[in-house]
Image (cartoon, grey):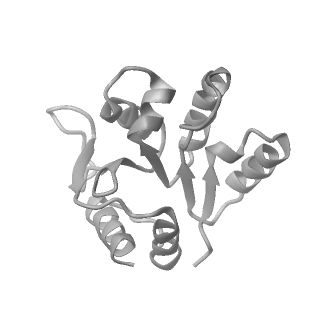
């Protein structure tokens, strides 16, 4: 299994890093892990960073978004709404990190059908927030899950590592 590509948005203010990240993002094959970390970024860069996060999340297999990052990127909306927006834009799952001991995984409905009561994604509450290196390692060894049980298993493996 190919080593997953990890892109941290905070590192993309340098033009050479952005060109490299976009190039790696277009290479078929390896899983793509996006960390939408913008908490320490200057306010003037936020509109551009929001566009960049949305662009990269379209092709990400997993996007990790913190609550503070969601607020900085999308303003005073509930972080879950921002996470669901990124999930709706892309093909992968979104992990909303609410704190060190709780997160919400947003992924495909296990039966793959639109639900009558709302979006076609499902929410899974986790009593942990796996670290990025552990998520990257779990994706490298297990690949990209196809359904909610697979994503839950991957998150549990990453948390246990």
| Front in this rendered view, residue 105 or 149 | 105
Q: Which quadrant, please, contains the N terminus?
A: bottom right
The vertical placement of 159 against 116, above or below, is below
* Quarter-of-image position of residue 82: top left
At x 85%, y 46%, the residue is 16
Q: Which residue lies furthest to the left in this view?
A: 117
* Quarter-of-image position of residue 54: top right
Q: Is residue 111 shown left or right of residue 98? A: left
Residue 103 locus on image (x, y percent) = 30, 52
Q: Which quadrant, please, contains the C terminus?
A: bottom left
The number of callouts visible is 0
| Front in this rendered view, residue 24 or 47 | 47
The vertical placement of 129 against 3, above or below, is above
Residue 98 locus on image (x, y percent) = 32, 46
Q: Is residue 117 shown left or right of residue 46? A: left
Residue 144 locus on image (x, y percent) = 46, 66
At x 33%, y 77%, the residue is 160
The vertical placement of 61 against 30, above or below, is above
Q: Which residue lies furthest to the right in this view?
A: 16
Residue 156 locus on image (x, y percent) = 30, 70
């Amino acid at each position: 299994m190919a080593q997953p590509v990890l892109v941290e948005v905070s590192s993309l203010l340098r033009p050479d890093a952005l060109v490299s990240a976009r190039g790696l993002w277009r290479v078929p094959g390896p899983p793509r892990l996006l960390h939408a970390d913008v908490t320490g970024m200057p306010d003037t860069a936020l509109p551009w960073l929001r566009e960049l996060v949305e662009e990269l999340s379209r092709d990400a297999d997993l996007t990790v978004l913190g609550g503070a990052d969601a607020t900085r990127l999308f303003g005073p909306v509930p972080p879950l709404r921002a996470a669901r927006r990124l999930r709706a834009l892309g093909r992968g799952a979104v992990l909303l990190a609410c704190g060190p001991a709780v997160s919400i995984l947003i992924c495909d409905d296990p039966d793959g059908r639109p639900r009558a009561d709302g979006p076609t994604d499902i929410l899974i509450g986790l009593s942990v927030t796996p670290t990025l290196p552990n998520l990257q390692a779990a994706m490298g060894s297990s690949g990209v899950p196809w359904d909610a049980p697979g994503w839950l298993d991957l998150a549990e493996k990453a948390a246990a590592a």
